[in-house]
Every structure is written in structure tokens, then in C-alpha cells.
Image: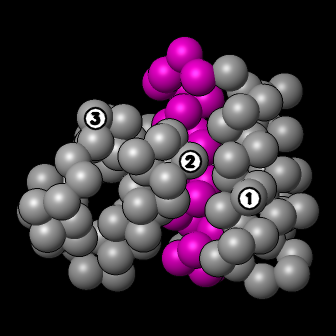
Amino acid sequence: MNRHTAREKAFQILFQMDINEKDPKDAIESFLEGNDRNEFLNSVVIGVSENKEEIDSIIAENLEKWSLARLASVERSILRIATYELKFTDIPTNVSINEAIELANKFGDEKSGKFINGVLSKIIS
């Protein structure tokens, strides 16, 4: 599994966790059903979960006229992944932002990509 696919699966797992509040390891196990174990996917899901308060604080500080609670789960989950990558990994900034925009375009509505790009641009500035 390449990183793009792993990131997409991590998004789906984190999206489910946002709704159902599952343990990260249990969520990964139940989503993958024992198939396609991936180190990167695990690190993203567990990393976001372990640093959720700090990540949410960073996101909230960079939202204009929005609150974190008002965000749709799709955008909230994508922003959490991208913020985790930007602040807690050595993944290049442009890669994290581009991947987040791709996720938003695939899973969000027609405005999601622009919204994600705007928030992430504020986070890195």
C-alpha cells in the first residue's frame, strides 16, 4: 500500500473514530479486517489520536468565523491528518497540503478543497 492509499484509509478510520469514539488500534483492526497492515497508516491514526487536543487547538486557532465543532466530520478529519503531518512529522509541507486537498476533493463537497487549503495555509504561516 502506498502512502496516498494509506492516508486515504487513515482518513476513513479517523472519520469513523470521530463519530464512534473507538480506540485507535481497535478502529484500525476492524477497518482493515486483518489485511494490508501499514506502518504509515498506523502512525497517522495513532499519532492523530495521541495528539488530538494539541492538533484541535492548532486548527481552532486558524479558523476564521468557524469553530471546530461546526466543521463537518470530513473536513475536521482531513485537517487533523494534515496538521499532524505538518507539526509532528518530517513529511514535506507541500506533500501534506496537496494530499489533504486531494482527500477533500474526493470526500468533501465542491468547496472543501479550497477551505482545507485556506486553513492549512494559515497554519504554516
Tell me if residue 51 is in the magenta stretch.
no
Question: Quadrant of the rendered structure where residue 93 is?
Answer: top right
Give percent across and percent down for residue 10.
Answer: 40, 56
| Near-viewer residue (123 or 104) | 104
* Residue type highlighted by circle 2: His
Residue 86 magenta: yes
Q: For residue 60, say whether it is visible.
A: no
SS label for mark 3: helix
Q: Which mark is residue 4?
A: 2
* Disc 2: CA contacts within 10 A as few (<14), some (14-19) or many (>=20): some
Kind of residue indicated by mark 3: Glu
Disc 2 vs disc 1: which is toward the camera?
2
Mark pair 2, 3: CA separation? 13 Å
Amino acid type shown at disc 1: Glu
Q: CA distance from mark 2 to mark 1?
A: 10 Å
Q: Name the side, left or right, on which 50 lies relative to 26.
A: right
Q: Which residues are magenta?
A: 70-91
Residue that numbered label 3 is attached to:
39
Looking at the image, which is closer to me, 26 or 120?
26
Give the SS element for disc 2. Answer: helix
Q: What residue is shown at x 64% (from left), y 68% (from top)?
A: 75
**Does residue 38 lie above or below 10 as drawn?**
above
Residue occupied by mark 1: 102
